[in-house]
Amino acid sequence: MMLQIDSIRTFYGETQALFDVSLQVSAGEVVALLGATGAGKTTTLRSILGLTPARQGTIRFDGRDVTRQSTHAIAQAGVAWVPEERRVVPSLTVRRNLTIAEKRTKFRHWTIGECCEIFTALEYLLERDSENLSGGEMQMVAISRALLGSPGLVLMDEPSQGLAPKVVQDVMRTVQRLKNEGVSVLLVEQHVNAALDVADKVVVLDHGTVVHQGAAAELRNDAALRSRLLGS
C-alpha cells in the first residue's frame, strides 16, 4: 500500500474541513478524488503533504507514518505535488525550474530527457524564461518537476484546469504513463469523465466526508449513480 489514510480530521483554525476521511492508494494505482467545489479534495492533498496537518487520524506513506512529519520530510520520502496553481518560478528558465527539483529517492529516477519524451514540446522550452509560458506549457513543467523528484506517489490537483482539450488529453496520457511505470497517483480533477477513464478507483467527497468509494468503471458505467454523486 503506497498511501493509507485512516479517519483523518483536518481543521482550518476552528473550522473542521475533513471528517474521518479514509482512503487507500496501492502501488501503481490511480485513484480519482472527486466532489464539488469545497468538498475537501484539496484539503485532503494538503493534509497528506503536511501543509494543513490532520489533527486526528493517521496518514501512512509506503508503510511509514507521516502524519506528524514536515512537508519537506514527506517530499524527501517520495511524495510529489502538482499544485493547481502550478507554481512555476517565473524568474527562472524552464531548465532551471526542473533541475532544482531533481532528487533521488528509493523510487524510480526520472530524467529531463524522459520528461521531454513524455511532453515532446518541452525540449524546445528548456531555455525559455518561465514567465513567458502558456498555461499548458506551465503544466508540462509542473508535472515534469514532480517526476524529477523520483516520486512513489504523485498528488495532482486539478491538472487540466484552464487547458485546451488537446492538452487535457496529453495530461491524462501522462497519468496513464505513470501508472504503467508503477507510480501511484491521487488525482483531483474537474473533468469527471477524463478522470474516470484513467482511474482504477474513485473516492467521492461531500462537505469533507467520504460518501462513495469503489471501482472507477462502476461510476463510469452507471449514469444514475454518477448523477446522484456528482451531478454529471
Image: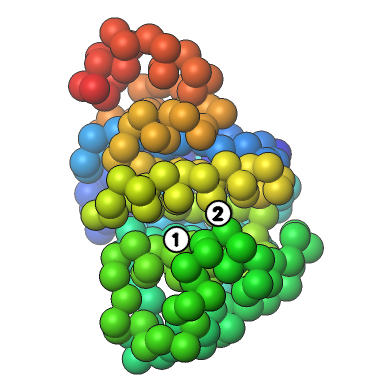
> Which of the 4 image quadrants contains residue 195?
top left
Q: Which structural element holds mark 1?
A: strand
Amino acid type at mark 1: Val
User: Where does residue 138 sit, x and y in percent of width and height?
Assistant: 37, 69
Contact flag, marks 2 and 1 (Cβ < 8 Å): yes
User: Where does residue 33 sit, x and y in percent of width and height?
Assistant: 41, 37
Residue picked out by circle 2: 154
As displayed, is residue 209 above or below residue 174?
above
User: Where does residue 147 sit, x and y in percent of width and height?
Assistant: 60, 64
Q: Identify the mark nearer the N-term, 2 or 1.
A: 1
Amino acid type at mark 2: Val
> How dense is the environment of label 1, judged by Cα within 10 Å: few (below 14), some, or many (20 and up)?
many
Look at the image and tell me whether residue 55 can be seen.
no
Residue picked out by circle 1: 82
Q: Residue at x 29, y 65 (%)?
A: 135
Alpha-carbon span between mark 2 and mark 1: 7 Å
User: Where does residue 183 sit, x and y in percent of width and height?
Assistant: 66, 49
> How dense is the environment of label 2, judged by Cα within 10 Å: few (below 14), some, or many (20 and up)?
many
As displayed, is residue 217 above or below residue 68?
above
> Which of the 4 image quadrants contains residue 3?
top right
**Residue 192 appears left or right of 77:** left
As displayed, is residue 117 above or below residue 23?
below
Compare residues 8 and 26 and report the one nearer the observer.
26
**Residue 60 appears left or right of 57:** right
- Please identify the residue farthest to the bottom as the structure is shown: 91
